[in-house]
């Protein structure tokens, strides 16, 4: 940063740098060829397949939740580009510390979908992440995952691994102290963390304008001394590129990056009674619908003859079938028990808990 | 055998474990170059390098998050929280995150973290430096709570805590850091977590206590002996898990008990101990169990600290109350 003496001026302040928004894919499906990430046709098709699949999965999950077959569920429709594009830029060995809405990223990173369903249903096996899948389960305390990601990244660095950690939160999460603490630790220790803020405009009902006086969330990274960028979060190519660039910097020992992804959730905050019509206008929703990440990307792929109606139908059918199979698997998993829960607290269950387990079994039977 | 103060014994425990296991890391505010505000970590950065023993930015939630993330990567963090009052900034990391990691991940991950923190009154420390917050921790499922009362136990318990695969909240009483020396073996040994120690045998009444109050209670017991009352004193050493077996065994012998704690009266360790005696030994009691504690106020620092804290006189009065019931 340039230091200027203002002895001869009446004004004195620190100026923030200007914020540039990374956008590659326009609304009509044309792209900025110069910025286009190096993706094969097959990879482009896979990005599309994952977004379409995720939207159908989302619709099915909402329906399952309404039927009482799932517990807590946070809809993802509208945010597919920021979720899928960012995860797609990672290696399998990279680590994800998600927020509560970020189930798609960890499932695409390797968590079996039925475990995501079990987690929602409050079954402990849901969080029993397979050995080779590098994720934590979605965080409920907004911001906790952000400080934890610094720890995971420090661990990877101490082990001499060239992997990065990506963590997600929302515009509301950027108000938490942990958001700054996590970025500051990553900056101070030069850790390979990618902090993604999916700014969808609302923390449940509170608009971003009431969240902060800062013009952008991206600029908050500057205070922590880390690279900070703002990205069109409805543009899957821009999201992919931003994370790929950040990951490359992380792998090269160039530290952390904050990515503010400007996005929108088409649905409610969660399935627990939130009604977006109470805080959003129809006009606003229609305006954002025009930026639908799937529609835009489909237009681009169609011009390249990479995506057909048949592909779309097949993907939707595949998603429906997968969700049906996976919920069936979740529902046929033996219900967890109070003794299971008791035994999950410590490596060796201490005497007082053994006693409580015994008392439970005596009273409740098997 | 070496004579050490409790703080030297604590440092020795960390040295032994840093040497033994390269996954052990030690960090916190000012623990590196300067060796901690109480010098508990003095010389350890020099011996083990900045990669293993290091200063963090001043942010307790960040320290807790760092410890948790490092635990996920297989490290065994010793995280120092500079003073116990600062724990409130790390409550989420300790009580909502580290405590649930094993459960949340179905056992894939755990939090083998030792949170060390100084606490305890009688040294004229400022506000929010000396609070006894063990009750908060005891009520959090998934955390072990350890409070040593002497150099030998401090080293052996700290080694056990560092090796434990679950989070341990390790409370170091400020008044005990340098107040006396005790015999401490060289090298490694452990004092098991979850086992109390009968530090004085007696037949008339049981005084159940921990931390600095062990010494206050022992002095009270000496005075009581002169008056013909034989008090048994139990040093709990660990509050979670609580060694209720040792407590009940003693109560069955003495039929009278008081609990002495430096913390405020309501809902703390003493309340839990009384509840468990009620559940397991009520028919052996000749008098209600009472507790000698500080009042339910914020910690009195400065001018009235001495009056606020439990002392020998209050312990003796408590014992007489249950003897004369």
Image (cartoon, grey):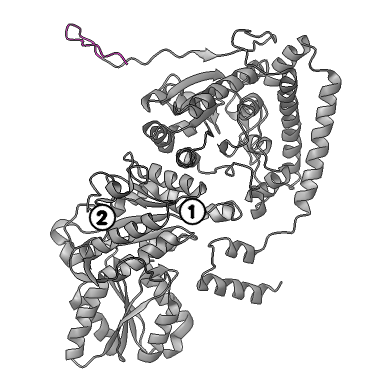
Dot 2 crowding, Cα within 10 Å, few <14, some 14–19, many 20+:
many
At 27% from the left and 47% from the top, the residue drawn is B46
Residue A247 located within the stretch drawn in magenta: no
Residue B54 rendering spot, x and y as whole percentages: 33, 44
Please name the residue shown 59% across and 37% down the image.
A93
Q: Which mark is residue B40?
A: 2
Residue A66 placement, left or right of B247: right
User: Disc number at residue B111?
Assistant: 1
Query: Does residue A137 lie above or below B185 as drawn?
Result: above
As helix, strand or loop, the secondary structure at mark 2 comes to loop
The residue segment tinted magenta is: A1-12
Look at the image and tell me in which quarter the C terminus of chain B lies.
Answer: bottom left
Percent x, y for residue B41?
Answer: 27, 52
Specify whether residue B169 is in view.
yes
- Contact, CB < 8 Å: mark 1 with mark 2? no
Choose the circle earlier in sequence order: 1 or 2.
2
Callout in the foreground (1, 2)? 2
Residue B266 appears in the figure: no
Assign the magenta stretch its main secondary structure.
Answer: loop
């Amino acid at each position: 940063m340039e230091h200027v003496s203002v002895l001869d001026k009446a004004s004195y302040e620190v100026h923030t740098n200007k914020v540039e928004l990374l956008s590659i894919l326009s609304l009509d499906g044309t792209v900025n060829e110069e910025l286009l990430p190096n993706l094969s046709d097959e990879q482009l098709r896979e990005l599309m397949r994952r977004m379409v699949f995720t939207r159908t999965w989302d619709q099915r999950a909402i329906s399952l939740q309404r039927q009482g077959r799932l517990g807590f569920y946070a809809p993802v429709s509208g945010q597919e580009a920021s979720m899928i594009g960012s995860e797609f830029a990672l290696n399998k060995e990279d680590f994800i510390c998600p927020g509560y809405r970020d189930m798609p990223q960890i499932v695409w990173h390797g968590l079996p979908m039925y475990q995501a369903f079990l987690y929602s249903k409050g079954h402990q096996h849901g969080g029993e992440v397979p050995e080779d899948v590098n994720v934590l389960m979605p965080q409920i305390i907004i911001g906790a995952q952000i400080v934890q990601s610094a720890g995971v990244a420090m661990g990877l660095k101490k082990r001499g691994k060239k992997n990065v950690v990506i963590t997600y939160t929302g515009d509301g999460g950027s108000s938490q102290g942990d958001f700054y603490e996590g970025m500051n630790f990553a900056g101070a220790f030069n850790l390979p963390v990618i902090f993604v803020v999916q700014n969808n405009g609302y923390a449940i009902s509170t608009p971003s304008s009431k969240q902060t006086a800062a013009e952008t969330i991206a600029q908050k990274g500057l205070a922590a001394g880390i690279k900070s960028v703002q990205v069109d979060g409805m543009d899957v190519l821009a999201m992919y590129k931003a994370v790929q660039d950040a990951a490359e910097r992380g792998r090269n020992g160039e530290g952390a990056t904050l990515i503010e992804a400007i996005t929108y959730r088409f649905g409610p905050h969660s399935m627990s009674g939130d009604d977006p019509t109470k805080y959003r206008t129809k006009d606003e929703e229609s305006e954002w619908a025009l930026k639908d990440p799937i529609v835009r990307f489909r237009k681009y792929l169609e011009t390249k003859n990479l995506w057909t109606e048949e592909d779309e139908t097949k993907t939707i059918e595949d998603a429906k079938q997968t969700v049906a199979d996976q919920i069936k698997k979740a529902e046929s998993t033996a219900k967890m028990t109070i003794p299971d829960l008791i035994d999950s607290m410590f490596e060796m269950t201490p005497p007082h808990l053994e006693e409580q387990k015994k008392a439970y079994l005596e009273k409740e039977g098997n | 055998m070496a004579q050490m103060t409790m703080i030297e014994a604590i440092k020795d425990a960390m040295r032994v474990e840093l040497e033994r296991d390269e996954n052990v890391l030690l960090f916190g505010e000012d623990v590196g170059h300067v060796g901690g505000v109480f010098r508990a970590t003095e010389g350890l950065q020099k011996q083990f390098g900045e990669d293993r023993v290091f200063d963090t930015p001043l942010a307790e939630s960040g320290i807790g998050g760092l410890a948790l993330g490092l635990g996920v990567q297989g490290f065994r963090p010793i995280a120092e929280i500079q003073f116990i009052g600062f724990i409130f900034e790390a409550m989420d990391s300790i009580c909502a995150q580290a405590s649930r990691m094993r459960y949340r991940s179905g056992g894939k991950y755990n939090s083998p973290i030792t949170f060390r923190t100084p606490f305890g009154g009688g040294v004229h420390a400022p506000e929010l430096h000396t609070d006894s917050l063990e009750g908060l921790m005891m009520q959090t499922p998934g955390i072990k709570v350890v409070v040593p009362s002497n150099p030998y136990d401090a080293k052996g318990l700290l080694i056990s805590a560092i090796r434990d695969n679950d989070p341990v909240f390790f409370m170091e009483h400020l008044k005990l850091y340098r107040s006396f020396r005790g015999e401490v073996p060289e090298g490694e040994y452990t004092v098991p977590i979850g086992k109390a120690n009968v530090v004085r045998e007696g037949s008339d009444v049981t005084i159940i206590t921990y931390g600095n109050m062990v010494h206050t209670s022992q002095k009270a017991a000496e005075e009581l002996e002169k008056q013909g009352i034989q008090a048994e004193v139990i040093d709990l050493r660990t509050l979670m898990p609580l060694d209720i077996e040792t407590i009940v065994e003693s109560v069955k012998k003495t039929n009278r008990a008081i609990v002495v704690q430096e913390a405020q009266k309501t809902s703390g360790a003493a309340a839990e101990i009384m509840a468990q005696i009620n559940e397991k030994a009520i028919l052996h009691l000749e008098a209600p169990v009472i507790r000698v504690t500080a009042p339910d106020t914020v910690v009195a620092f400065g001018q009235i600290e001495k009056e606020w804290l439990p002392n020998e006189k209050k312990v003796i009065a408590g014992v007489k109350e249950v003897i004369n019931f």
